[in-house]
Image (tube, rainbow, N blue to C red):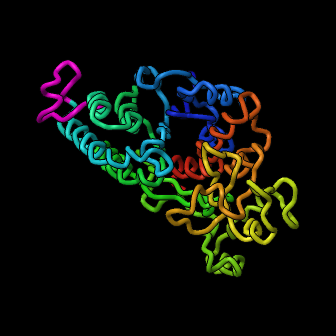
Amino acid sequence: MNRPLDANILFSGADGWATGMRPLGLTNTIGFEFNHAAVVTARANHHLVVEGDLSKVDPAEHPALGLIGSPPCQGLSPAGNGAGLEDFTSLLWAVRMVRRWIEQGCMATLSDPELATTIWGWTPEYAIAWLGSVIRDPKSALILEPVRWALRMPEAPHWIALEQVKTALPVWEALADLYRDMGYSVWTGVVHMEEFGLGTTRERAILLASAVHDLSDGPTKTHTRYHHSRKDRRFGYAAEQGLQPYVTAAELLGFAEAINDPVMAWPERDTVAEAAWVYTRPMVAMVGSFRPDIAAGPGYRKPGDGPRQNARGSIILSVEQAAKVQGFPDNYVWDAVSEADARLQIGNAVPPTLATVLIRFVTTGA
């Protein structure tokens, strides 16, 4: 008998999820990705990926034990155009109507649209189509693809893992109720990357669901959370908490002494003192598409301060350093695509280090 797929990975990108599953022995995965450059990178690293429009794929043809999804975040991200933030009401209504359809025994079908919009609720396909017609950022409708897949795969997945920007947490909480209706134990929350050994304070909203294990306690943190008031007693506080201390940017990237050539300020070299934050704290994040090679200097940003990449103390990262910040292994191949594409993929990826922790928890309950 053929071994079943470990997981279908929706919006797989450069395949940070699949990379993080490899240490767990879960190597039989298939990704689904629209962006050609991301597909090239994933395949260069020996991941199986289907390229194309996910909405055209029939989940009934893809049985697997698990379901993973990282829908595009631009529509819901403060870093994007912000239109998706106003679409929450529509998204929540669509989820509510799909829940009604489940509660009614999934009786409505695409062939009876009148029923599909009244007492019987909405099919997932109808909900996605409706969202695409009423919201300003059509990409936001893709956040319901994991619902369609969970309901349309040949057998319901044993477990589900979803990731998005932290502003999407209310949507994950709404989906959690839907998945509980289907019999899953569900955990939702915002994870702080440094609490899982990554050298950044980036935050992400996570949904984990299991048909087998109780997930109510959430994944176990391994490191302390960064706070500026504790940076001078990092190791003592970690010992008190029974955790490892958070990883500083310098420790992650191997900077042992004063700021050296790999760490350069932009647009001009800052003083050593201004860039010395790398020795005391994790990074805030890579800036984004305008200057994806910049790790912004920390500090409060108020209106009128200008772009974050102009902040004093900002540093330049190579592609390899940026990938290391995101938890990719040193031997991951990025040169199959342009440097600009590689940097964008790194910034959008689920860190493999985090993926390992989340998938271990959702598949074992520990």
What span is in magenta? 107-124
Name the residue at 88% across, 67% down: 257
Q: Is residue 149 magenta?
A: no
- Residue 191 visible within the image: yes
Name the residue at 34% across, 46% down: 175
Residue 236 placement (x, y as % from top left): 70, 81
Residue 270 placement (x, y as % from top left): 78, 64
- Residue 212 visible within the image: no
Compare residues 103 and 90 and report the one nearer the observer. Answer: 90
Q: Is residue 228 left or right of residue 176?
A: right
Name the residue at 74% across, 27% down: 336
Q: Residue furthest front?
A: 304
Q: Is residue 176 left or right of residue 47?
A: left
Residue 111 placement (x, y as % from top left): 20, 18
**In which quadrant of the rendered view does residue 115 lie?**
top left
Name the residue at 75% across, 50% down: 317
Residue 88 placement (x, y as % from top left): 32, 47
* The N terminus lies in quadrant: top right
**In which quadrant of the rendered view does residue 27 lie?**
top right
